[in-house]
Image (spheres, rainbow, N blue to C red):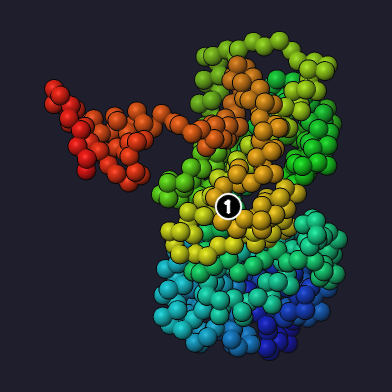
Amino acid sequence: MSKLSSIRPNCDVGLIGLAVMGQNLVLNMVDHGFRVAVFNRTYARTKSFMERCEAEPCGGNVSAFEMLDSFIENLKRPRKVVMLVQAGAATEAIIQAVLPLLDEGDVLIDGGNALWSDTICREKKLAGKGIHFIGSGVSGGELGARFGPSLMPGGSKEAWAFLEPIWVAIAAKVDSDTGQPIEGALPGEPVTDGEACTTYVGADGAGHYVKMVHNGIEYVDMQLICEAFQLMKELLQMSPDEMSVTFRGWNEGELNSFLVEITADILQQRDYGDENHFLVDRILDAAGQKGTGKWSSQSALDLGSPASAMAEAVFARCLSAQKDERVTASKLFDNPKLSPVTGEQKELLIAAIRDALYCSKICAYAQGFALMGEAAKEYGWNLNFANLAKIFRGGCIIRARFLQKITEAYQKQDDLSNLILDPYFTGQLKERQSGWRKVVSLAAEAGVSCPAFMAALAYFDGYRSATLPANLLQAQRDYFGAHTYERTDAPRGQSFHTDWPHPMRPQQKI
């Protein structure tokens, strides 16, 4: 009997979906001593993966199956089945195929980027059949899945108890004191010390909601870095290798993060076969997206939670995709002319861009955590924001040094309404806002598009304003639609209406 067809009984966990993430998560589980059964809709991919396993230190702990029923029967009870397939129809198809083969008490885990509302419905439906359902965010890309991702499980606590030993084992690890990721994992030699970057998030769709917001923050983080890149390119005429050195320096300080680190690496890459050009200059400026950033922005609108920087990051990708139209428009308008910036002024402006990046990043994360707070109220989730910040410190795409500061902020005050109000972040914004304002002003004068920088600054200025022009707006709404208004000299909640068409314009207390 071949390895492919041999059945190893009593596997600890099963995984369906052997794309990049699925394959690497299997190998990660095996590294930590778990026996894993695997199934893929296309068996050719299963065979290809098993060939890869022969070159990995799997020790025969991966069992492949061509038939779904054999795959299920080979799992220890209660069976734990992880799905890593495309969200939507593909996920639903797998659930419907697996469901008749499961028994009461078995656990089905969706590790894809499912819409949280779908997860809520699925968890409720499957609970009625006696099946535990967990919607778990998985972040970290290919390397994260292989050596330690950030994992965000949502569902019942009873279901989490079955999955917890596996998720804690395979998650990324960070130093408990510094919050810095513990590196050095190799095939067959996983990191086992440190704090695991996973925690029980909350009921039903909470895990997938948090993963969605994580991705929304990721959108902003990436856009902000790209705007810093564009400013250095357009205002300072810096070459990619010069910018690489700058980003590498920033990565040594408060901006230390996975995204800044890879940006420095990307910018130093020369084009293939042409050492006179940098690869980044040959990559078409049209960005793709998979939907989680859009979902985050839509949810923010639904919940009335201002996440303007997040939305602008999504729109920036949409605008980038209109490449041909942008090229046409570029021929119709001249850029404003600014004097070249050199010498000491250049260094000062680089420092200002750094400050703008950090301040905007603070506001982006403040928007993301505030959005999760509104969702918690709406859907009855008891989210622990200190723990969520903790699990973002390693494994995931947004991992960054300053997440330790976010962790500490929520540890000091678990009901903190906005990160901007935390003393550390208040101090940083006070200290750095002048550079931020200078950069946004220069960008506007020079005609350099920086929507996320600008949106973050507008959010900050709005949030710190005791008064906004919404008083006039509310008067307008009352004028044409009798929507009423509150008064500054009356208790909150007391509404008034002016009879605007009446010549005397009498006011009524509603």
Between residues 163 and 41, which one lies in front from this camera angle? 163
| Disc 1 residue type (three-letter) | Leu
Query: Visible in this render: residue 94?
Result: no
Q: Is residue 103 above or below residue 503?
A: below
User: Disc 1 designates what residue?
Assistant: 416
Question: How many numbered markers are drawn?
Answer: 1
Q: For the C terminus, which image quadrant?
A: top left
Q: Position of residue 390 (x, y in %)?
A: 69, 59
Q: Residue 276 is drawn in which quadrant?
A: top right
Q: Position of residue 130 (x, y in %)?
A: 46, 84
Q: Position of residue 163 (x, y in %)?
A: 63, 77
Q: For the N terminus, which image quadrant?
A: bottom right
At x 44%, y 62%, the residue is: 379
Residue 416 appears left or right of 52: left
Query: Visible in this render: residue 9?
Result: yes
At x 60%, y 73%, the residue is: 82
Q: Residue 141 is drawn in which quadrant?
A: bottom right
Q: Is residue 498 above or below residue 167?
A: above
Q: Classify 10 Å Cα crowding around label 1: few (below 14), some (14-19), many (20 and above).
A: some
At x 56%, y 19%, the residue is: 330
What kind of element bears circle 1?
loop
Between residues 175 and 215, which one lies in front from this camera angle? 175
At x 86%, y 61%, the residue is: 184
Between residues 418 and 220, which one lies in front from this camera angle? 418
Q: Position of residue 373 (x, y in %)?
A: 52, 55
Q: Is residue 249 above or below residue 304?
A: above
